[in-house]
C-alpha cells in the first residue's frame, strides 16, 4: 500500500494522459464546446496516441544524448587532466540554452532537412545546461574528507568516480536531468514547424486554421506528459538521497 501511495501521482497523470490520447471520439463533445462553429474538432492528420509516442521518442533521444554528453563532459573536466577545459565546457553549455531553439531549427534545416533531426539537435543543445551545471555542482561539491578517505582505502581514480563520487552526486545530477527533460517536453512542440510529427502538430494546425480545439488537444497532452515525467522524477529523487 505504501508503495502504491508513493507512486500514485505519476500513475494518475500517466493514466489520464493515455486516456486522453486514446479517447478518440468521446473527446469530440468536450472539444465542440471550445469550437462550436468548426466543421471538425478532432485533429484529422494522425491519432493522438501516435503523436504522443513520437513526441516521447524525440524527447527521449535528445535527452539521452544530452545526458551522455553533458555528464561525460562534466566528468572529464573535473578530472586533473581536464580542469583547464572546465570554463569552456560551462560556457558552451550556457550558450546552447541561450541560443533560441527556433534559431537552431532555422540553421539545422538546410543541413539536416525537414523532419525530426533538426528538433533533436535543438533539444540536445537546449537541454545541456542544467545537466552540465548540476553534474559539475554535484562532483565539485563533495566533501574533500570523503575523497581522502576513499584514497586511504586504496581506491584508484576510476573506483572513486563510480563507487563514491557519482553515487553521492546522483541526486543533484538527477535534478538537472529532471529540469532538462521537463523543459524539452514543451520545447519539442516547435519541431512541428519544420515537419516533425509530434504533439506540436495539432497546435500549429490550430494556429494556422484558427481552431482552438486542435490547440487544446496538443497543449493538454504536452502538459500532462510534462506533469507525469516531472512527478516520476520527484519520486526517484528522494530514493537516491
Image (cartoon, rainbow, N blue to C red):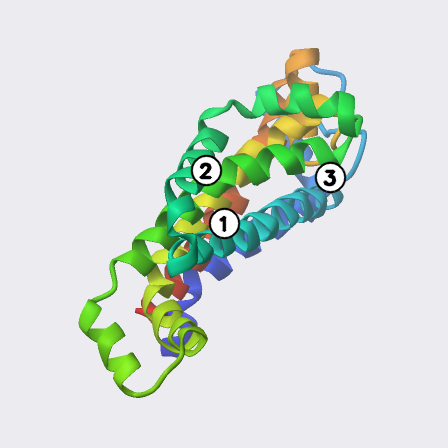
Separation of disc 2 and disc 1 at Cα?
A: 8 Å
* Circles 2 and 1 in contact, beta carbons < 8 Å: yes
Closer to the chain start, of discs 3 and 2, is 3
Q: Of marks 1 and 3, which one's residue comes earlier in the chain?
A: 3
Who is closer to the viewer here, 99 or 50?
99
| Residue at which label 1 appears | 70
Single out the mark in the foreground, 3 or 2.
2
Residue 25 badge = 3
Residue hosting label 2: 93
Task: Locate the N terminus by quadrant.
Answer: bottom left
Q: Position of residue 63 (x, y in %)?
A: 57, 48
> To which quarter of the image does residue 112 belong?
top right
State the image coordinates of residue 207 (x, y, percent, origin top left): 64, 15
Q: Which mark is residue 113?
A: none
- Mark 3 element type: helix
Q: Of tags 1 and 3, which is closer to the observer?
A: 1
Q: Quadrant of residue 151?
A: bottom left
Structural crowding at the residue carrying mark 3, measured as other residues with C-alpha within 10 Å and reported as few (<14), some (14–19) or many (≥20) = few
Along the horizontal axis of the image, is 165 left or right of 218? Answer: left
Q: Residue at x 34, y 64 (%)?
A: 169
**Residue beneath the point at 35% across and 52% down:** 136
Where is residue 3? Give x, y as percent. 40, 76
Work out whether residue 39 or residue 84 is closer to the camera in this orientation and state it: 84
- Residue 185 occupies quadrant: top right
- Compared with residue 31, is residue 65 higher up or lower down, i.e. above or below? below
Q: Residue furthest bottom?
A: 153
Is residue 30 in sight in this rendering?
Answer: no
- Dot 1 alpha-carbon crowd within 10 angstroms: few under 14, some 14 to 19, many 20 or more: many
Asked if residue 63 shows in the view, the reply is: yes
Q: Nearer the viewer, residue 133 or 49?
A: 133
Amino acid at each position: 500500500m505504501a508503495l502504491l501511495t508513493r507512486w500514485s501521482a505519476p500513475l494518475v497523470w500517466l493514466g489520464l494522459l493515455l486516456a486522453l490520447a486514446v479517447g478518440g471520439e468521446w473527446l469530440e463533445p468536450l472539444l465542440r464546446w471550445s469550437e462550436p462553429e468548426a466543421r471538425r474538432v478532432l485533429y484529422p492528420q494522425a491519432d493522438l496516441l501516435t503523436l504522443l509516442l513520437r513526441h516521447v521518442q524525440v524527447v527521449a533521444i535528445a535527452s539521452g544524448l544530452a545526458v551522455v554528453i553533458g555528464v561525460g563532459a562534466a566528468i572529464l573536466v573535473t578530472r586533473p587532466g581536464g580542469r583547464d577545459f572546465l570554463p569552456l565546457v560551462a560556457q558552451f553549455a550556457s550558450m546552447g540554452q541561450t541560443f533560441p531553439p527556433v534559431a537552431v531549427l532555422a540553421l539545422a534545416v538546410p543541413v539536416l532537412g525537414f523532419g525530426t533531426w533538426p528538433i533533436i539537435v535543438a533539444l540536445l543543445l537546449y537541454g545541456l545546461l542544467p545537466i552540465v551545471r548540476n553534474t559539475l555542482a554535484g562532483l565539485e561539491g563533495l566533501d574533500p574528507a570523503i575523497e581522502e578517505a576513499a584514497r586511504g582505502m586504496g581506491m584508484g581514480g576510476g573506483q572513486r568516480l563510480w563507487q563514491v563520487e557519482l553515487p553521492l552526486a546522483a541526486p543533484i545530477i538527477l535534478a538537472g536531468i529532471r529540469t532538462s527533460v521537463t523543459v524539452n517536453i514543451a520545447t519539442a512542440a516547435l519541431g512541428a514547424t519544420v515537419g516533425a510529427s509530434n504533439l506540436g502538430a495539432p497546435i500549429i494546425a490550430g494556429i494556422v486554421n484558427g481552431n482552438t480545439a486542435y490547440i487544446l488537444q496538443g497543449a493538454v497532452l504536452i502538459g500532462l506528459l510534462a506533469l507525469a515525467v516531472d512527478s516520476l522524477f520527484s519520486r526517484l529523487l528522494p530514493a537516491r538521497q
